[in-house]
Structures are given as C-alpha cells and as structure tokens.
Amino acid sequence: MMLNRLSWCCGTGLRSFAKDVRFGVEARSLLLQGVNTMTNAVAATLGPKGRNVLIEQLLISPRITKDGSTVANSVQLRDRRQDMGVQLLRQATNNTNNLVGDGTTTATILARGIACQGMHAIRQGQINVQLLREGILQGSDVVCEALGKMSQSVETIGQVEAVAKVALNGDERLAEMIGDTIMELGECGVVLVKESSGPLDEVRFSQGATLPSGYCSPMFANKSRRSKVEFGNCLLLLTLAKIDQLEQILPVLELAKLKEKPLLIIAKDFSSDLIKILALNHLHGRVQVCIVKAPSFGEEQRLEMQDLALAMGAHLLEGASCLRELKEEDLGEVGSVVVTAKETHLMQPVGVNEDQLQSRIDYLRELVGEALTEEEQDRLNIRLGRLQGYLATIYLGGNSELEATERKDRFNDAMHSVRVAISDGVVPGGGTAFLRCIQALDELPPAEVMEYQVGREIVKDALRLPCYTIAKNAGVDPNEVLQKVLAGTGSFGYDAAKGEYGDLMECGIVDPTNVMRAAISDAAGIASLLATTEALITKQPIKPKIAKNQVTQDLAKLVGM
C-alpha cells in the first residue's frame, strides 16, 4: 500500500515525496524474508562441520570465514523492507557478541525460530500480541535459570582447551595454544592476536612494559654486538615536553651522576643538537644515558604516557616548566631496561602505587568491554598489558591471507568463550543444554493466560533448533539425532565431529553457560518484537543519477550502482 504520497506541479517542475507503508501479515512477512536470508547465511557456520562463507570486499580479495558475527555484519539486502528484518536480527546478535564475545550464530538461529513461531501463532486467530511477547520472555527466563543450575565450573587447563576446541570448530592445535597462554598469563592476562607473515603459528610473551619506540641514536648502545642498550637500576624521566636544550635536563643529569645510576629519558621529542650532545656524553662515560621518543601522537600519546608513569612509579611532567622544577620523587626507578632500535622494554619497577595502578587497570577493562571496533580493542589491550606488566602476542599463520584471517576470527571467538567459561562455568555443548531445558518448561504449572502458554511453547520449539542445525551441517538426519538426544538424560548428546553419541562433558564438548544464556535472552527479546510488529515504514529507493562519461559509469558498476 502506498500512502503519504504528495505530488505537486509548479511551472515545468514536478516533485514527489513518498514512503512505503505495509501492515499486518504483509509487513511481518517482509521482515521474515530478511530474517530467513540472514539466518541461512549465518547458520551454515554452526558446529564442527559448519561451512565457510565467502564475503566480497570492495577493491580487495574476498574474505572467507566461519565466524557467525562477521557473516551477520556482512549481510545487507537491496529490498529495504527485508533489510529491516536483517538489521533487527543483527542488533540481537551484536548485543550477544558484545556482552559475552560469542554466541552470534546460536542467537540468530533461536531468534528466527521464535519469530517464525510467533508470527504463525498471530496468524491463527485472535491473540493479544503483548501478552504473547511477555510469555516468550518468561519462557526465556526459565531457560536461563535452568542453564544456571546445569552449569559446571571450569577448573583445569584441559577444560579450558575443551571450550576453546568447540569454539574453534575442532582445531586442537589452536586450542592447546589458548590453554598454554591461559596457564602462563592467568585468566585476566592480556592477549593480542595478529596475523603472521608466514604459515606457522607463534606465541610471544613479554614481561614489564614494552614501547614501540627505540633509541634516538645507535651511539647510545652499550652492547655493540647486539646494537642495544641495557641498564640496571635505572632512573626514568617521563615528559610530554619537547627537549631542545641541554639546560632543560641538566638537573636530572646531575642527579643521575650523583646517584651513580643510568638514566632513561622518554619525551615527546628531542632536538638533533641535543641528541648529539647526549650521545657524546654517553660515549665519554660521564653519565650513562639513553633517550627515547614517546609512542603515539596527540591525546593517545598523553594517555599512554600516563599509563607508563603509573606502571613505573614515576610522575609525568607535562611541560618544560615542570622540568625546571623537577624533584627526585618525580623520577621512576626500573630494575632492568633494554632498548633496541625499534623497542624499549622496562621491567621490575620500584615504588609503584598499587591502588592507583589497579584503579587504572579496572578502568581500561571497562573501556575494552565497550570498544566498538577491533582496532580500538587492540589499542586498549596494549595499554592494559603495559599496566599489568605481562602480555602475550599470538601470531596466526596460514597458507594464504584468507586462511590467516579466517583463523584469526575463530581464535578471537575462542578466547572470548574461554574467558566467559572460566568466570561462569560450562554446560553440555552441541545444543544438548537447550534440549535439557525443555523439561524445565514442561514442569511449569499451566499458565492461566492462554498467550503465556503459547509463548512458552514457542520457546520450547526453538530450543530444538541449535542441535538440529549442527546435525544438518554434519550431513546426518537431524530429526533422528534430535530424537535420540531427547531420549537421553544429562549431558548425553551428539558429537558431530566424530558422528557418535556419548557424554559430551566427558568428551570435552561444552559451551560457556553465559554465552548460551545471553543467546536465548537476546533472541527472545528481538524475535518477540519482530513477531508483534504491525506496521512497516520504509523510504522509497531513489536511483542515483550517474554521469554519462565512461569513467563514472565504470566506477558505478564497481560499487554496484
């Protein structure tokens, strides 16, 4: 139905403004078409035998992935009405991913199931849609409670590796790497994941604080063979000022000479004349000194230097005036310093204020949880690693760039799953945990309100879908698998990787409890909104005008216009 169309003619010009408005069954049907398209793409990745999805990227090579979140964020439909269904579903999956770092595919499958059943119930006859929504949400609350009772704590590295292996679709090598990293760093350790330049995987652990800046001149090196600077019991000066003249740092040089200790200066910048003077001073053996430019630029540089000051027990001197009034307590002291042409390593700081340091660490952890992009998250994790004094960098290789990117996606998901599992426990995997929650819904007393009972039944039917999808992706009869698993009890389920039935907890096939709870909760919330939608309003698509010259026409074709 076309409404709100306004047309008027003035002289020779004609203007029209229009929006497309659809109601009832037609509106919900259009939304559901978009939901089905997105869910079919995402569901293909579920389980140990899930399929790959190839995603086009403008001007660069396509991306291949089995990461449900990446697939969900890549789906965009030309029909705006169908795309609204995609956007609403993506909202639920992104919420799950942001909250617990995994569970995107499961949440998508559950949301589609609940939305389909809800729309079907509304079509059958007179029903109060708001009460139906409340019934669906009540059913999801019961499932969350049942999952909590079913949960078992993670206490061994073997269990950590089991969680990682499931999230990695059965990759034992990467699962062992995650287990070793957690054992080395602890559950709160900072892990950075990067793509390797070769086919091999590698883990590098670094203690203390590492800066991506080296010495300003190789003349400062006191280990000539290795071209590096090594200091022990070193004084540390941190400033955001640009140091142009020797007089600005003369007090701190005299203090270092008096205490007979080496000195490391990290500043915003240094003049070329000052670099030469300090290098000659170092060569003549008057004062052991090395100078390093502060990392980053602008506000990010200020924040990183503030972090470093807290981690090293020093005061950050903001400007040149602070240098003139420098006191001994403004300096930090570091047990070991290693400076190369590209990096600076600071270890064993002395006199750190632990309360202030912990407060800063907690603040950065909150920022990491709120980060919107992978780049922002990596930047915050690097800062967090410096503050904590321990960091692991994992380089993932592959036979091609596509393979390395795909493995990185899976590894990030697995790390999130492991952290959630350690904090909240695990439940049987393979969709079995959801199947066991059906009994909790069956044991509820009959609802006095008919819509509440219908809502419970809708949730109960949706709980079968994760196990069904995993079996379907594995190439076996999903109905037969469902029947056998439902006939069992406890953690008895289907191992899709081996094609066998057994105790999934003993086999190490588990899912983090909080991931499953977030998936069903977010799916119920967004799906009940989809099912109870009555009107759909979209803008009419406007075909852009493209110039007639060949260059612009070719560019338009390239971007799909």
Image (cartoon, rainbow, N blue to C red):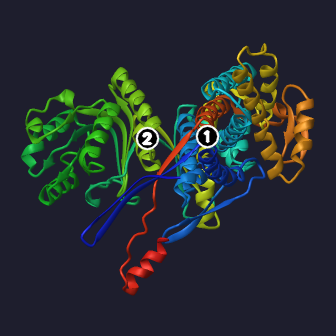
Percent across and percent down for residue 105 are 66, 45
- How packed mark 1 is, by other alpha carbons closer than 10 Å (few <14, some 14-19, many 20 or more), is many
Pointer 1: what residue? 102
What is the quadrant of residue 312 in the picture? top left
Who is closer to the viewer here, 450 or 549?
450
* Residue at position x 23%, y 39% in the image: 238
Who is closer to the viewer here, 353 or 446?
446
Pointer 2: what residue? 371
Q: In terms of sequence position, does the residue under pointer 2 or pointer 1 come before the other?
A: 1
* Residue at position x 13%, y 40% in the image: 319
Look at label 2 and name its amino acid: Ala
Percent across and percent down for residue 147 are 72, 24
* Residue at position x 63%, y 23% in the image: 131
**Res 202 seen here:** no
What is the quadrant of residue 153 in the picture? top right
Above or below — where is 550 with respect to 472? below
Above or below — where is 247 with respect to 505? below
**Res 106 seen here:** yes
